[in-house]
Amino acid sequence: MEITVKDALKIGPLSTSETVAGHQKLDNVVKGVTIMEAPDIVNWLAGGELLLTSLYSAPAGTLNYKEFIKKLADKGVAAIAIKVGRFVERVPEDMLEAANQYGLPILVLDANVRFVDVMYPIMAELFNNQVVKLNYYKIIQERFTTLALHCLGLDTITKTLEELIGNPVVVYDRNFKCISTTNPLLKKFSEVADLFQRESLNDKLSFYRQIVQFPALGEEAVPQVVVPIQAFSQVKAYLTVVEVNKRLQEMDLICLEHAATVVTLDLVKKVAVQEIEQKFQNDLLENLITGNSALNNTLERAALIGWDLSRAYTIVLFNIDNIDGILAKSKHSPDTMLQGLKSDVVSIITNAVRNHTKHYILGTKNDSIILMWPSPDDQNGFLELIKKTGKEIQEQIKKKVKKVSVAIGIGDVALNVDEIPRSFKEARDAITFGRMIQGQHVIEAFSELGVFRILCKFAEGNELKNFVPKPLLKLIEHDKNNETVLLKTLEIFLECNGNASKAAKELFIHYKTMLYRLERIKEITGIDLEANEHRLEIEMGLKIIHLLGNQAL
């Protein structure tokens, strides 16, 4: 246990001393006792000292007491004990004022008190406390080392820690989902105060205390000590202690530090196992989407990890947008950063998809995440469910993973293993073509691309612009030179199935203005909008322009 100034006032001759200033800091921790021999002693202090002096080396008028006391307080001196009646009759007033101002307790000793009689009892107490700490440290270390060597798991670790510190313990994953707890009522919590009001307990290990509420316990706010658990330069979990029974003391924090080490080792072991399993799954998934492996071999490997490839699946592909720009700005290595990004995105996807199905298959490939979503026999509403879930995933990523967004492509249903490569290619094409049409952050299903599936094939070879009808090129040129919107007028007119009145309402113009614009379009282009072959050619041309953008023409 730590010894405070208040505790020291009960030890030896200090029990008869009088506190004359700095009462507000009697909880200062005493770490040692030092005799002041010269005014420049402040240069040699480390903090936590109980300073003993008779002011012989700094009599009144020879030292700026205000400045001196400030320096001592800044150094973290616990208190200063002054023996009066020998060299000074009383403590100087300006010293008392400074002590009250800067919060440095001043104790007055009788002239007959020997400094050695003050020092020995306090140093003995400090030494005894160190021995107690060392013994406790040894016991705790042996106990948690045993847990680590026997690989007894998080539940045993949390129960042991609860026994030692007398408060319930919870371990949350990086998304604050409970993965182990000694009290089921503490699985979920919400922070009451913002992060700027957290109390730092250990800068080296990032311990902090925050005020939270547990819905299962009611509306009462309780303190929670949090220890971030890091592995591979990333926070993987949070070891927390809920101070419902007592506030953690110094010895408890020592125990918590050892527990954090064992939790870290347990998580590192699990991460290592998961990485091996994930590599196996990714290799198998690579074979599925490329069709490079023999069917029997693929089915055997899938059975080993519980994958059911006898059902139909829809491939959903998630591509991380602007991945090169994100990695270039990162302080971490590209591989570490990419792994962290994928891990965050995979976690969000998993949490969203598991609400709808338990039999999904998930893996990663480069900067993409591949999801094989089991397809139901009744496809009614299935595509809408995937797109709705995809939208939720995009919003969660935008909220939780800064500067990261994903584009989502959805292939058609693969009825068997042989059709998985085709569904994967369709999902990939849906993203590629969807970006051409809509830009980034797209959610596109291959089945909904329609005629764009044909047009985009030409776009891949940069040949698409050769198919833009010349009448439309004339119209684009006219709009540029005259600042008109005839191309837009034509597009709306065709979207309204040639209904000039409806098109005028869509464009918020008068019906006669619409007729005038249609006449100008006919004069400039020479096209007959009543002829079916002209309309088909123009509609296809408008879609090509929409894909390429005017700047590409």
Image: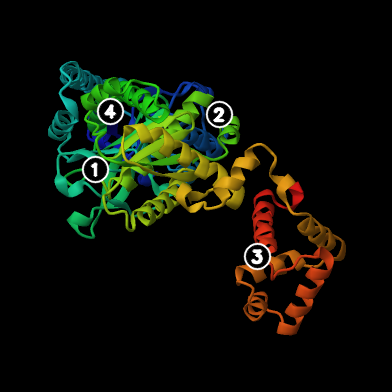
Residue plotted at (41% across, 53% down): 387
CA separation in Å, label 2 and label 4: 26 Å
Residue 114: x and y, percent?
31, 23
Locate residue 517 relative to residue 450 in the image: left or right. Answer: right
Could you tell me if residue 81 is visible in this image?
no
Are there few (<14), some (14-19), or many (20+) residues within 10 Å of tag 4?
Answer: many
Q: Which of marks 4 and 3 is in front?
A: 3
Label at residue 358: 1
Between circles 1 and 3, the one closer to the viewer is 3
Amino acid type, residue under disc 2 in the picture? Lys
In this figure, which residue is indicated by the disc labeled 2?
331
Q: Do the residues labelled 1 and 2 touch (CB within 8 Å)?
A: no
From this view, report whether residue 275 is shown above or below residue 65. Answer: above
Nearest-to-viewer mark from 2 and 4: 2
Residue name at image x 22 percent, y 22 percent: 133
Q: Where is residue 23 in the image (x, y as percent from the top left)?
A: 36, 45
The residue carrying mark 4 is: 260
User: Residue 521 occupies which quadrant of the picture?
Assistant: bottom right
Q: Left or right of 385: which side holds 162?
A: left
